[in-house]
Image (cartoon, rainbow, N blue to C red):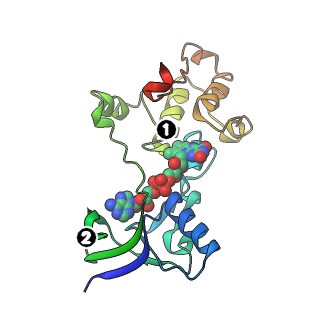
């Protein structure tokens, strides 16, 4: 027999947990199930600091169990498909789950391979992204500085955290390293087409 919940939320990311918490704040009798297979929740905005060597990656990891609201049920599973006409969804191991209301917030998956040459450039250590791996960003920045004989002091970087974004952080580092003057950070932002017209 399929399980049934009043509200089903995919997933236990920031959006899913916030939605469940806010709904339960309004009415703590709601029957809410959160579906997420992950054991660990990461506070992603802190990855900017990880990429600049100013914060430890493991410090912003929390166990999923400690963050799921006590009044919500956690279904530790992966959603595989939707049956919108029947108000049900399928999971990898827990079978079919029914809902009255469904919140879908499974986050984003970064796929560098969609841009030709990008994975190779990342592997070479000349391109990095906080959105794919902030630890790799910090390794890449450290290597740039090491190759010019300068030691990077992450305490120093931290004192320069202005907008807490990697471009200004890199710029601040470069101010202490004349040999990197020809490395120009470019802040490139993708905007929706209608905004760019
Ligand atoms: C480097 C960096 C810096 C950032 N800085 C800022 C900032 O300064 N300010 C700001 O507001 N935002 C910032 N963000 C953005 C913000 O962190 C994200 O938008 C936010 O964490 C996304 O939350 P989410 O719940 O949508 O997804 P996530 O937190 O990614 O959670 C997605 C969850 O969905 C689960 N999931 C995926 N597929 C399934 C499935 N099929 N079935 C069940 N579960 C599934 C995953 O296991 C995961 O737990 C930053 C992000 C990054 C990476």
Q: Residue at x 43, y 64 (%)?
A: 11
In the rendered image, the vertical position of residue 86 relative to residue 61, given as above or below: below
Question: Is disc 2 placed on a helix, strand or loop?
Answer: loop
Q: Which residue is outermost to the top?
A: 182
Q: To which quarter of the image does residue 180 belong?
A: top right
CA gap, disc 2 to disc 1? 34 Å
User: In the drawing, does residue 119 fall left or right of residue 10?
Assistant: left
Location of residue 161 in the rendering, given as x and y in whole percent from the top left corner: 70, 37
Q: Residues within 10 Å of mark 2 (few under 14, many from 20)?
A: few
Q: To which quarter of the image does residue 122 belong?
A: top left
Q: Is residue 15 visible?
A: yes
In the rendered image, the vertical position of residue 16 relative to residue 2, given as above or below: above
Q: Residue at x 54, y 64 (%)?
A: 19
Residue at mark 2: 92
Q: Residue at x 55, y 21 (%)?
A: 185
Question: Is disc 1 placed on a helix, strand or loop?
Answer: helix
Q: Is residue 50 visible?
A: no
- Whether tag 2 and tag 1 are in contact, CB under 8 A, the answer is no
**Residue 21 vs residue 184, the one in the foreground:** 21
Residue at mark 1: 137
User: In the drawing, does residue 94 fall left or right of residue 102?
Assistant: left
**Residue 94 vs residue 145, the one in the foreground:** 94
Location of residue 81 in the rendering, given as x and y in whole percent from the top left corner: 25, 62
Location of residue 100 in the rendering, given as x and y in whole percent from the top left corner: 40, 73
Instruction: Identify the mark nearer the N-term, 2 or 1.
Output: 2
> Which is in the foreground here, disc 2 or disc 1?
2
User: In the drawing, does residue 68 fall left or right of residue 154?
Assistant: left
Q: Is the CB atom of the residue marked by disc 1 within 8 angstroms of ligand 1's nearest atom?
A: no
Dividing the image into 4 quarters, which one contains the N terminus?
Answer: bottom left
Q: Residue at x 63, y 23 (%)?
A: 174
């Amino acid at each position: 027999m399929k399980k049934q919940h009043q509200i089903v939320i995919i997933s236990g990311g920031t959006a899913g947990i916030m939605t469940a918490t806010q709904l339960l704040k309004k009415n703590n009798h709601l029957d809410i199930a959160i579906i997420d297979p992950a054991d660990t929740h990461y506070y992603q905005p802190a990855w900017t600091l990880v990429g600049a060597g100013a914060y430890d990656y493991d410090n912003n990891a929390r166990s999923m169990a400690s963050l799921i609201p006590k009044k919500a049920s956690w279904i530790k599973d992966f959603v595989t498909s939707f049956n919108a006409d029947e108000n049900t969804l399928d999971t990898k191991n827990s079978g079919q789950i029914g809902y009255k209301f469904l919140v879908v917030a499974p986050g984003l998956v970064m796929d560098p391979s969609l841009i030709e040459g990008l994975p190779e450039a990342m592997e070479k250590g000349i391109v990095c992204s906080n959105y794919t791996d902030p630890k790799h960003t910090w390794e890449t920045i450290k290597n740039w500085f090491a190759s010019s004989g300068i030691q990077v002091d992450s305490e120093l970087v931290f004192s320069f955290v202005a907008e807490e974004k990697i471009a200004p952080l890199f710029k601040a580092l470069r101010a202490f390293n004349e040999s990197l003057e020809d490395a120009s950070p470019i802040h490139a932002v993708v905007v929706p087409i209608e905004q760019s017209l």
